[in-house]
Image (spheres, grey):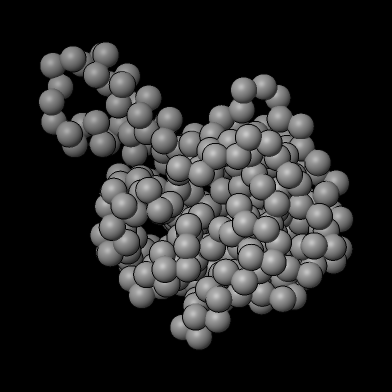
Amino acid sequence: MSLVTSEKMLLDAQKGGYAVGAFNVENMEMVKAVISAAEELHAPVMLQTTPSTVKYGTLETYFAMVAAEAKKVSVPVCLHLDHGSSFEVAVQAVKAGYTSVMIDGSGENFDENIAVSKRVVDVAKACGIPVEAELGKVGGKEDDLETEADTNTDPQQAKEFVERTGVSSLAIAIGTAHGFYAGTPVLDKKRVSEIKKVVSVPLVLHGASGLSDEDVKECVQRGICKVNFATELRKAYTDAGKKLAEEQPESFDPKKFGIVSMKAVKELVKGRMRVCGCDGKAE
C-alpha cells in the first residue's frame, strides 16, 4: 500500500476508542521492524522522524525507505515529522513526501504558538497534509529541546487553539516526559477527559516510553488517539546489538547486528500496539 496521511487513521481511532501507535525510527532496520509488526498485527501505523534524525539521514532518505517498505504491506502506513522545529522544516517535510507533519511551537507563548501552527496548517492543508501541534509543555528532552518542568494543557486554551489554527490533531501535556522516567510518573489523566469534552480533533500523547500499560490504556480510554514511542525503541535496538557483541565478540557482520535488533524492536512495537488497541484495526 502506498503511504497514507494520518487524518483518516486518527479519526477512525477517535471513533473506535483506540489509539494509533506512532514509532520513532532512526534507520532502515527500525523502519522494517515497525512496518513488519504492523503487518503481522494488521494495525495502522505511523513512523516518525525528529529534526535530529532528519539531520542525520535527510528527509528524502527516510521518505524513500518508508515509502518502499509501505508498498510491500497491506496495512496503512503514515510517515510523520515529529516535533517539527520550525515552519521551514515542516514545509520541507511536506515537499519531501511526508504524509503528516507536526509543528512544535509549545516553547513559544500562546499567541506565537498559534501563529506558527496556523502558518504551517495553511501550507500543509493546501497540499492535503494534516498537521499536529502541541499545547502545554511535555517535560524531559526531545532532540535538543529540553523542558525542566511540566506545564499541563488547559482545556479552554486547547479549544481556542484548535479553533484558531485548524490543526488536525493536538498533542497535550498531562505530566508525561520525553525519555525514561527517573521515578514513577504522576499523570493528570482526568485532564485528557476534560480536554476531549471541548476539543473536536484527535488528541496525542507524547512521552509514552516507560509508562505502564495501565497508564497508556487509561489515557486511550479517556480520549487519546495517537501515542508516541521513541526512547524505548532506541534502547531495545541498542541493547540487542550489545548482547550479540557480548555473546559473539568475533561477529563483525553488520547484518547480524541488524537482524537481532530488528527482532527486538518488532516485538516491542507489537506489544505497544496491543496496549494501544490498534491491532486488527487496519482497513
Q: Note whether 125 is above or below 77 in the view shown.
A: below
In the rendered image, the quadrant that contains the N terminus is bottom left
Q: Note whether 134 is above or below 266 in the view shown.
A: below
Q: Is residue 111 visible?
A: yes
Please name the residue shown 32% across and 61% down the image. 59
Q: Is residue 40 visible?
A: no
Please name the residue shown 45% across and 43% down the image. 143
Q: Quadrant of residue 181?
A: top right
Q: Position of residue 61 (x, y in %)?
A: 26, 59
Q: Note whether 247 is above or below 76 in the view shown.
A: above
Q: Quadrant of residue 264?
A: top left
Please name the residue shown 28% across and 64% down the image. 60
Q: Position of residue 37 (x, y in %)?
A: 44, 48
Q: Is residue 167 left or right of residue 26?
A: right
Q: Note whether 200 is above or below 237 in the view shown.
A: below
Q: Is residue 165 left or right of residue 143?
A: right
Q: Quadrant of residue 244?
A: top left
In the rendered image, the quadrant that contains the C terminus is bottom right
Closer-to-camera residue (264/180):
180
Q: Position of residue 170 (x, y in %)?
A: 67, 62
Closer-to-camera residue (154/241):
154
Closer-to-camera residue (104/248):
104
Q: Position of residue 156 (x, y in %)?
A: 84, 63
